[in-house]
Amino acid sequence: MSQESHVSEIIQARAVSKRFKGRTGEAVYAVNGVSCTIKRGETVGLIGESGSGKSTLGRMMLGLLQCDEGEILFEGTSLAGRSREEMRALRAQMQVVFQEPYQSLNPRMKVKSIIAEPLVAHRLCDAPERAKRVAEAMEQVGLSSALARRYPAELSGGQQQRVGIARAVVARPQFVVLDEPTASLDRTIRRQITDLLVRLQQDLGLAYLLITHDIASVRRMADRSLVMLRGSLVESGPTDRVLTRSGHPYTKALVSAELVPRPGLTQERYRLKPRPIGTPPLTPGCPLEPVCSLAIAECSARMPEMREIADGHRAACIRWRDLQTPTPPDPGGRSSSGPMRPPLAIAAGARLTPPSGATR
Amino acid sequence: MNDIGRFCLRRIPLMLASLWGVITVAFLLVAAVPSNPARAVAGTFATKAEIAQISKNLGLNHSLWTRYIDYWKDLVHGSLGQSIYAPTSVMSQIGQLLPSTLELIILSLIFGGSLGIGLGAVSAYYHRRWPDRISSSVVGVMQAIPDFVLGVLVIYLFAYLLGILPGPEGQLSIVATPPPSVTHMILVDSLLAGQFGTFWDAAQHAILPVLTLSIVISTVFARITRAAMRDAMDSEQTSFARACGLPERQVVCYALLSSRTPIMTYTAIIFGALFGGTAIVETIFNWNGLSQWAVQAMLKNDYPEIQGFVLVIGVITLSVYFLLDLATGILDPRVRTIGAGT
Amino acid sequence: MLEVNELCVTYVSRGGTNQVVRDLSFSLGAGEMVGLVGESGSGKSAAIHAIAALPRPVKSVITGAVHLNGRDLLSLPPKQVRQIHGTELGFVGQNPFGCLQPTLALHKQFHNILKAHRRTSSKADSRRQAQAALEGVGILEPDRVLRGYAHHLSGGMAQRVVIAMATALRPRMLIADEPTTALDPTVQLQILDVLSDLRDREGTTLLIVTHDLGVVAAYCSRVLVMKSGLVVEQGDVQTLFETPAHPYTRELFAQEELSAA
């Protein structure tokens, strides 16, 4: 088996790419030359919108998808070319929690069977030990043992997600991919689940890859963050820096799109220009160029490289310096042409202007 | 090359493979037949020598593989062989009889389809209210009656009891003279020849068989339409259409539009299935169509005729499937753009 | 503008009856942008559809009154309701691709709407009106969009088209059922801008159903909180965020405070 190397890096992706065949036969890169590292016990947030390739990257890191280019290393050894037996043993070390709890649980299986599945699949222990571990996992995620014999349909959304989490940790993995774990849950439950995940991480020493487009959860959970856009990594670094001193306009747009539930708070909104119809084909240049207010000629010529803009903080934008200084919102082209709303008031302490004619 | 062209090109290998499959299966059917056709031709009192001679004449003494090659040779020359019992070409027989069956099939699809879609749409729109209950009951009853029972029933009711329609005499009255054969479809030919009297006669004779078949297939259309339209009426599209103030008529149109694809797909399937369905109806009504002829051929063990029949309807069914897939691709823009490539 | 009085919606099924909305009462003034928040199961969807007089697949019994510009929608004959839909009241759903017809070119869909309300004289005229409507929601190439189909569009564009269709006849009130839930964050912002722009430019009254308090905080002036079919609290946004009165409101909004910290 693999040497019990206490390598601090659990998962490493080295310039991995994933190609799919496009509609007219050309290659479409869902993931394009992405490199990243996740250390033992840390949480890395992977932020992006739909089409960014973040879920695909997550699957590649779990070994569920083959890399067309590059390789994934688990504890220093590559996932490529492993035998089925080896992969099976490795997979026990890497688990995943999905977004839709109801869809990821087999509706025909009882809760205790669902949670026991990884143990059965990886043949980790015998039946009595299994029962013990299942009970342990249920306790860890805060599910009462009475629910063991229920079916998923009888559980609430939050409880279902707890089952999904219990299933992910029962095999005592080292690395868990969280694919939008709270997106489909009610607001009041989200906080509980997030707290649970943090606590489990501390207790079990788990490394997390948190895939999401919700800035708030990244801010709360992730030590480091990665930002993906149309398959490419455009920014990486400590979460705090990435969110507050973004080096890439896309990150800035994502952050400012976060609607903070505090009325009257003035937020500097960095808006993107409206996107042209559908998905334009990938150009050799930066994928943000068509909608970026900072775009210059060079941006469409070549994909900018990830450059170090501060210690441990990298971004793939030629004009990153312009972002570091507090810029006025919507520089240049603004959010769109035409009769669009001007940005919210920036003056300190300015309140949200109430709409006119607001009478009963 | 546009999408349609690409679609056709992609389908051709598949079609050719299917065609080859049909031809081979048609041929192998003969090999599966347990009895010896030569013996049947020779008669009950034939001697061994006579049977052997006939066998040789028919080419039955050759190996299966040789016969297969010969079969292909004939096909390439456009020949489906000759009937065993009569020296007529199978191809010409099929050519004369197929149109009559097609007449029945097409008319039944039109009427049965309309009836079924209508019943299904009513059921879907008035879901769980009384029109739905009535419509569903009607469909249920129609579904329960087997086609041969239905055929006999309508004859009894309309021809015998009420006397308003002719009985099972075939396509025309016994005393009528058929119009000159152009398409071999009596209804069409009589119109072409301007013989309206004959046309009316033929039409009357066609009513009962078409009615029988229509009722049978309408049940399938009704179920499909009901399910598809039910989904469409419950969808957010309907809600939004209403929210924009569109009249109910338009909303129903939209729902039918969405149901178009499953209905068309089933039309293709039913078309193929009707070749079997017409066998019974043609026999009951003495229609003198291809299916009736095929049944006779099977009873006689006239294997060239059987092979010819299987081959021809196989080819027709494949073509119909292809055409309908093409039509679906053209009509549904989503499929069109996905089309070739993936 | 809109006054809802003791609206009750009861779902009737073979298993029994379920009152999903109980005695809902509130009113909206012209030009207001109001949020209706609640978690799943709070009945906000049922309420909103009842208010908009849109039938749902579930058999329901609706009582109460919904006064739009003085007329009670629930007691009007269907023909008049249909007339109101689109001209005085618009509705936008959560999934834009669920609202648009997939197999019909977009300009035809616009034409059908305009024709139904007799606001067009020809196909060319419909096209012009549609183009204007699309420009009003910030679409830069309206002609290209109109020639295409729904699936050619990205989520954000499709939602803009839906809003354009719903407001083509300039209704004074627009109800949006979770209009941004299915969209990416940067696109959400754009769509909310479109909606608030409608309010600013045309004075449209907006009732936005959402479960996202951030939307409420950033765009709405008043908010109604629903739980289990009842409005547990309503008032202006500032007050509810700072000093929520009802325990449920407190619970709901408090979570937000914590998560934003």
Image (cartoon, rainbow, N blue to C red):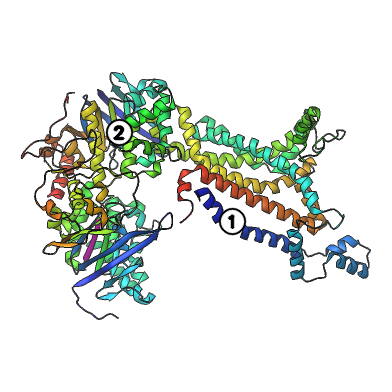
Q: Name the residue under label 2.
A: C135
Dividing the picture into quarters, in which one does residue C245 lie?
top left
Say if the magenta span includes residue B122.
no
Residue B32, compared with residue A358, is above or below; it is below
Compared across the picture, whether B237 is left or right of A331 comes to right
Mark 1 belongs to chain: B
Up-down: is A102 above or below A120? Answer: above
Which chain contains the residue that carries disc 2?
C
Residue occupying the far top of the picture: C70
Q: The C terminus of chain A appears in which quarter of the rendering?
A: top left
Tell me if B330 is positioned left or right of B269 in this view.
left
Considering the whole magenta stretch, tell me its main secondary structure.
strand
Q: Where is residue B265 in the image (x, y as percent from the top left)?
A: 56, 46
The residue tagged with tag 2: helix, strand or loop? Answer: helix
Return the residue at label 1.
B12
Number of numbered discs present? 2
Which range of residues does the magenta coloring cover? A207-211
Q: Give, as a three-letter code, the residue at label 1.
A: Ile
Q: How crowded is mark 1: few (under 14 residues within 10 Å), some or many (20 or more)?
A: few
Q: Which of A25 and B142 is in front in this view?
A: A25
**Marks 1/2: CA–CA distance:** 45 Å
Determine if residue A142 is in view: no
Residue drawn where x is 56% and y is 52% of the image: B8
Three-letter amino acid code at disc 2? Glu
Q: Residue at x 16, y 65 (%)?
A: A202
